[in-house]
Image (tube, rainbow, N blue to C red):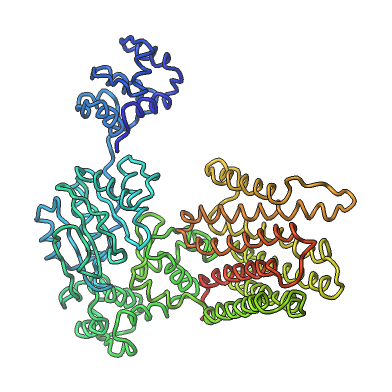
Amino acid sequence: MTASFADQFKKYRLKSELARLSDLGNALAEKGFIYEDSIFSHWQKGSRIPQNRVVLIKLIEIFVDRGSITTEDQANKFLSSANQGYLSETEISKLRLTRKTNIFQVPNEISDFVGRQDVIKSLSSKNLAGKIIVIHGPAGIGKTALAIKLGHLLRDKYADGVLWYKIEDDNLMDILLSIAKVFGEDINDIKSLEVRGTVVRSLLTNKNILLFLDSAELSRKVNILIPNSHTCTVVVTTQKSNLNLPTVCLSVKLDAFNDQEILGLFKRILKEKFEKFSKNSLLKSSDKVGKLPLAVHIIARNLYKEDLSAKNEKVNLEGLYLKDESLNSAIELSYKKLNVNGKSVLISASIFKGKDFSLKSISYINGLSEGECQSVLESLVDLSLLEQSTKNRYRIHPAIQDFFRKKLNPKGTSNLFLYANLIFGFFSLWWIYLQLFVSPGNNMYHTMGSTYFILAFYGAICGIATSRLWGGLSTLLGRAILMFSIGLLGQVFGQIAYSYYTNILRVNPYPSVGDAGYFGAIFFYIYGAVLLAKSSGIKINIQLFRKELIAIVVPAVMVSVAYILFLQGYELDLNDPVKTILDFGYPLGEAIYISIAIVIFILSRNMLDGIMRSNALFLLIALLAQFLMDYLFILNYENYTSGNYIDFLSLLAYYFMTIALMSLRSIQVKVKI
């Protein structure tokens, strides 16, 4: 999908600040070539393409001089779009172009890698062009470590680079987009997975690349990434050997380490301390964890930390693992030795769905400075509990991730969700019963309309508790959760006051003291949304509006919607200024916090590695339900009665806000010891 000559000609002309075709004519004339402007118009429309290679080289020279073409790859694409092939070495030297940098995306080498020499020797000696290599075996067996080693060993054999992607069940579209961008193609407008896959496979057909697809068992459609190419090599790592791949594969099954490899790994990590341990004892300890390389690595790192200065005889490790003969026992051993920050950071790393994650993301989540967090991460890497992928990015092994995900939710969090669902279910069923079987005006309507604030109160209390777990006022996320919780308490106050006016005084409650709670909640929600955006890595400032068109479009649309729904044709009543202020304030204030919530939801996919996206969705639904409820209330406030559909919308808003606050609790990572 290389752009046409016409498209590239126009793009580079404009980037060269040759605004008029006559300006380009003058630039070419200085190079000794005189053309009428109409010729350039034909080039730009695509009705003609210049056939003189010398003229094309002069055009490239002009674009290079003006900085719009900077690389050999750009110049080659421009030249080939006119059916003139690629630049010669002589032409390249004259044009002062930057050589295309060889792409290399493989994570950093594992410093203590040992073993697998037979596999490495076998694969290194073969012609792997056009081959698909499937490296398979159980978790912790060293599939990814071997793949990383191969990537570094084989990189010089692939002229077009080495690509590395971690497979997930929902990131194939992103991987295809990334591959296309690597080779200068923008396929963002293609929304079909199959079509996007076809384009990328076609793009890779003649490329000489080494493509790594790590943890391929996580997707049933990994075959969509496999090109039909005689020059590409694809290395797939997977726990399953029977993947749905399009052609015959070279299968590499990894087994547990043998005794020689185990002792080699211990010796590499323990260094001078290796002689302090009984070899038989080391082998027995590795037997306890199934001789899995990852587990042995963790054991060795822990033993290296031991103070052995006072021991004058061989150290016996008998009884080191008593509870569980598995990888988990090795992980548990390391986990128990960590301090509070180490445990928090390690557990928080498990929320990233196996992706590499950034230092910045972990810092935000744990309320640590980047310097403090980096120190903790380095200590975890030293214990083999994390690995460093690239500068300031880290990854966690899937087996370790599974272990810590079980520790992720604080004790009792699942019960809190259950109680919220029970409260919501109770009032929902009550409301449905009233609509089907009870006549309007019955006291049961008033009772239901006066008591469902219990859900909002419950959500607010849970939110305040969650805020405290996150550090309360001392952290961005803690303050954000607290603001939403106070907003919910404002809703509680408003509903109690409205119930008093409606059911006791029998008067219309709008406007009344209850609006101090309802209207006041808007300001807390706005401030909470701003803080949540910041804690999600999104800075609400002028640069955001410059970089992200969505940050301008969404608020403009929401304010327009608020005006059309609430204020179009509105007649000012200067005799009732409070009502006028509320009539304007409710829709405009809600438009602001909904706009921020939408921006958070859209941008959070790329911020903090996407971990806040589901929380932003719950929040957005809650705020939209609140917006709709207020619209319908203001539209029909003169006919409002307790327990009608407006109250049910309010119940929905309470429910989703409660779930949003508790889902933030479920990624809480502070650990008590």
- Which residue is more in the foreground, 101 or 261? 101
Residue at the location (29% across, 35% down)? Answer: 2
Q: Quadrant of residue 447?
A: bottom right
Left or right: residue 394 compared with residue 446: left
- Residue at 37% across, 58% down: 171
Comparing 373 with 317, the one in front is: 373
Is residue 309 something that shows in the picture?
no
Does 619 appear above or below 561? Answer: below
Q: How many marks?
A: 0
Q: Position of residue 305 (x, y in %)?
A: 35, 75
Tell me what residue is drawn at x 22 percent, y 25 percent: 84
Q: Residue at x 34, y 44 (%)?
A: 181
Residue 629: quadrant of the picture: bottom right
- Residue 672 visible? The answer is yes
Q: Quadrant of the N terminus?
A: top left
Indicate whether 109 appears above or below 57. Answer: below
**In x, y percent, where is residue 249?**
15, 60
Determine whether, in the image, residue 343 is placed left or right of residue 539. Answer: left
- Tell me: 119 left or right of 541: left
Picture coordinates of residue 622, whole percent (x, y): 61, 64
Q: Give residue 517's quadrant in the image.
A: bottom right
Image height of 492 relative to 311, above or below? above
